[in-house]
Amino acid sequence: MPETSNALTELGVAAIREGVAKGSFSAVEVAEAFNANVAAAQQALNAFIVPTPEKALEAAKVVDADRAAGKPLGKMAGVPIGMKDLFATRGVQTTAASHILEGFTPEYESTVSQKLWDAGAGMLGKLNLDQFAMGSSNETSYFGNVISPWRRNDGGNAALAPGGSSGGSSAAVSARLCPAATGTDTGGSIRQPAAFTGIAGIKPTYGRCSRWGIVAFASSLDQAGPMARDVRDCAIMLGAMAGFDPKDATSLDMPVPDWEAALSADLKGKKVGIPREYRMDGMDEDVAKSWEQGIAWLKDAGAEVVDISLPHTKYALPTYYIIAPAEASSNLARYDGVRYGLRDMPSGGNLQDMYAATRAAGFGAEVKRRIMIGTYVLSAGYYDAYYTQAQKVRTMISRDFTDAFTRCDVILAPTAPSAAFALGEKSADPLEMYLNDVFSVPASLAGLPAMSVPAGLGLEGLPLGLQIIGRPFDEQGVLNAGLAIEQRAQFTAKPERWW
Amino acid sequence: MSEYRIQGATGEWEVVIGLEVHAQVVSKSKLFSGAATEFGAEPNAQVSLVDAAMPGMLPVPNKECIRQAVRTGMAINAPINKWSRFDRKNYFYADLPQGYQISQLYHPLVGEGEIEIGIDDKNPDNTKVIGIERIHVEQDAGKLMHDQHPTMSYVDLNRSGVALMEIVSRPDMRSPAEAGAYLRKLRTILRYVGSCDGNMEEGSMRADVNVSVRKPGDEFGTRTETKNVNSVRFVMAVVEQEARRQVDLIEDGGKVVQETRLYDPDRNETRPMRSKEDAHDYRYFPDPDLLPLELDDAFLEECRASLPELPDAKRKRYEQALGLSPYNADVLTAEAETARWFERLLSATAERQNKPEADVAKQAANWLISELFGALNKLGKELQESPISPAQGGELLALVGDGTISGSIAKQVLEKMLETGDGAVVIVEREGLKQTSDTGAIEAVIAKVLADNADKVEQYKGGKEALFGFFVGQTMKAMQGKANPGMVNELLKKALG
Amino acid sequence: MSVDTATVAKIAALARIKVTEAELEAMVPELNGILAWVEQLGEVDVTGVEPMTAVIPNHLRLREDVIDADPLTGGGIRDRVLANAPAAEHGFFGVPKVIE
């Protein structure tokens, strides 16, 4: 019996793929259902910068035709997804949520998005994000804030942050505008928004997914990853996204394991490390409780829980906020009005004036701030004190993890220091916003695979996420522990539709 | 010790020169992208998305470019750093799409080396060693054209991303002549190695000229840098002009400012560059898109094994093993192609005459330099365009070697060879140019010559020995040059007593 | 290390971002706040520690010297390269005239 539209949009990646393969419904039906949800939510949530319903339908038609012809179907066949607007999509505007790239239409497709299309997925649209992936609340986009579909249970209707930078992705998945979306994670931009909106998201080992065709923010930290409603869906989608790319010199030349096939929530024989330095003074009560609960769940799954130390934890955030802006200041130098994007030409001005005016008009405040910090810490006289020092501390943070992993197999920690806050609440002081990344940044600096899974709701009725960090290349261990939590958390809450 | 001095009002000044040469690497594709590198293409026809610095683009290094830089380092006796790194040099300019150049500052690929230069034209063995501080690999920038439009400059990124070797000399040069000699020698080495074609007009090799002046014995003075000088002649002119300018400035009470300058060949003067206003804070940091470059021994060995005999070694071998004069050895080794041509000629000549190469080397060298070069010059052709092959040269030389024709007849034959394209043997046959060693025939002609010039015979016998040459000449003339000169000499001596 | 308006102005110039007086004034305390906070890295004893050069152990791959081996990173695509140019003329990118 054909599913109703509503029911279709409740399905995740695995269910849609199976349904299409079996013939329970057509890929076109699925695409139409999600297209409708996207359209209905666009004004209220602003999750998409550019919806592309025709593209979703186009891909769906191909899958339906392939199925009819008996051709083999790909890993994501019939699954329409949202594409964070940081991935270059050929023929479709790609902006990185910035005015400086408004109207830019790439003549090329990013490796990761191409792999998803090759796997049979379709594009519902380009998702909104923090500008150039810089932010933790999706409040820095030139195309307006993304509003979280979640609301506090206080009866008020304060607009909440969906997290960032992949705020459009997290909002869209949790609001059932798409079953899954791509995100990118540099300091927590997949994990934190996933936690804020009660969905799952994984940042793989650095180098697991190709960065070719993804607008670069901080080269040594950026990683693409899936955001979906459960662990299995993430495993499926990551399998379609990952793989060696000769066009990316930092790409891992390793085979992609079949993470989905090897999923197991049985953690017997596994050790879970609890980092004592993550227990911070004044930690949010809900977050602390959720963490304790997570520990209990993993024990229940058969794991042994051990106390570990990551001594340089407190230096991770400042290290990140030196290295990431430094790399960004250089990566964003190409946005100069010469070859693409915005050009602002003051009358009577010369080339250098054009640069200065274009970049002033094109970049948002947070982007400018980070470029300035980055330029400063690389400048003559400060390079050693800031940048070199930060890279050395980074080595020590990485070593902390290597040491810890001799005593445990995965690490359990909160994903974010609080549940979602209201838009505008943390805008006064940039530093306050940066502190959101305190739990997520260390794994980024060390290049480790890390994921967030929904653990429950806090007192205000907002989702809380738990983070699992694993050894390099051990996405499986991370996914498995995530699955163990997911099965026990039984998180079925979803935002009540107010739009 | 260089004697070059600038004469100033307050005395003599010494000039200190360092050269930073940017040499485009010979490779099919660019350093970090697959776009082609060939010169002269339509604007922006050889530009990839990576070279155009589109959002999300990433660099992947070209093995051949690294290989060429390593081979060049080996050719100047420099250590190769098995671990080196790429750094970003950040600045804004329209020919620099990324807003940074990928270069190597902190850990270059090649360490300290040296080049031997000749400092005395008359004696090529009189040399000076110029130190090289380092060679590193980096991206070239695109090209800006300022004269195509009234209010716009045009950007062509074909050259953007082509691999460059930056070869930094120590400030060891002390005269325009030394700077010129260094540049020429470096160019020769690069062309021998095959890592750069050294074509300065096309821009595949350019020099930044660092000049400072000092009173002999003093500390180094402040230097200026004159960028992108694209001929040896101009480099020497820059040294002269800039040194002079600095001396005049200092003696007038001024101070030399460390700045970047450009050379204007029309005015033969250097002037400060306008665009480099704010301090050169390039904010170098390791490129996070690239891992450190690590080379293994197998790779290095392959590079070393692939090196040809280098100019200095070749020149010494020509002198010592082949017995050539230092001058000739120098001429023949100045260009790899010339040496190659000569060696093929030598091989053909030795084979035809069934003699060891050392025995025929002088003959071959002399003929190539004195005869063929001159003949090709008249035709306006380079050696590479010679209608005559080394094998054909060998054929001609063999006819002289075995006495079939004389040296002077050989000149005629050469001309005919160039005219007709035929081989020496064919021409000699056809034109009946064989020289005679027939004693009887020569004796008969000698007898007639002496008889016709009895008065001169008397004078000769009376002591005017120089007349011997006259008799030789007359005899050769009467035999239309086709007499074996050695035989003529011998028989004339006999006839004259 | 703290910054003043003059320093911020210099950084903005290096970064080619035009800032108004008002923006300069506002940026000073913001940047100082961030810089003061990252200063704490100075207290870490990093003796004998090398700066990180590779996040995950890996070797730099060198590619073969083949022209246009991968169409995505090869040349001969002028129209696509110029497609998004604000000012393209006769196959060139046009920029305000530069005088050297």
Image (tube, rainbow, N blue to C red):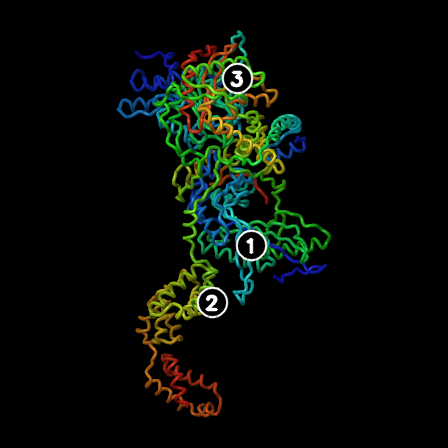
Give the answer, above or below, for where A371 lies relative to B465.
Answer: above
The C terminus of chain C - image quarter: top right
Give the answer, above or below, for where A73 lies relative to C84.
Answer: above
Q: Amino acid at mark 1?
A: Gly
Give the residue number, with chain letter if any, for mark 2: B328
Q: Amino acid at mark 2?
A: Asn
Q: Amino acid at mark 3?
A: Ala
- Whole-percent x and y of residue B158? 47, 43
Q: Chain of mark 2?
A: B
Snapshot quadrant of residue C16: top right
Circle 1: is it few (<14), some (14-19), or many (20+) Cα within 10 Å?
some
Q: CA distance from mark 1 to mark 2?
A: 27 Å
Residues tagged 1 and 2 counted as in contact (Cβ below 8 A): no
Give the answer, above or below, for where B315 lies relative to A342.
Answer: below
- Whole-percent x and y of residue A132? 52, 27
Give the residue number, with chain letter if any, for mark 3: A161
Looking at the image, the residue that sits furthest to the left is A70
Front residue of B281/A107: it is: B281
Front residue of B385/B440: it is: B440
- Whole-percent x and y of residue B212? 64, 53
Which secondary structure, mark 3? loop
Give the residue number, with chain letter if any, for mark 1: B131
In the picture provided, is B256 more to the left or to the right than B94? right
- Whole-percent x and y of residue B170? 58, 52
Which secondary structure, mark 1? strand
Please tell me if label 1 and label 2 are on a single chain. Answer: yes
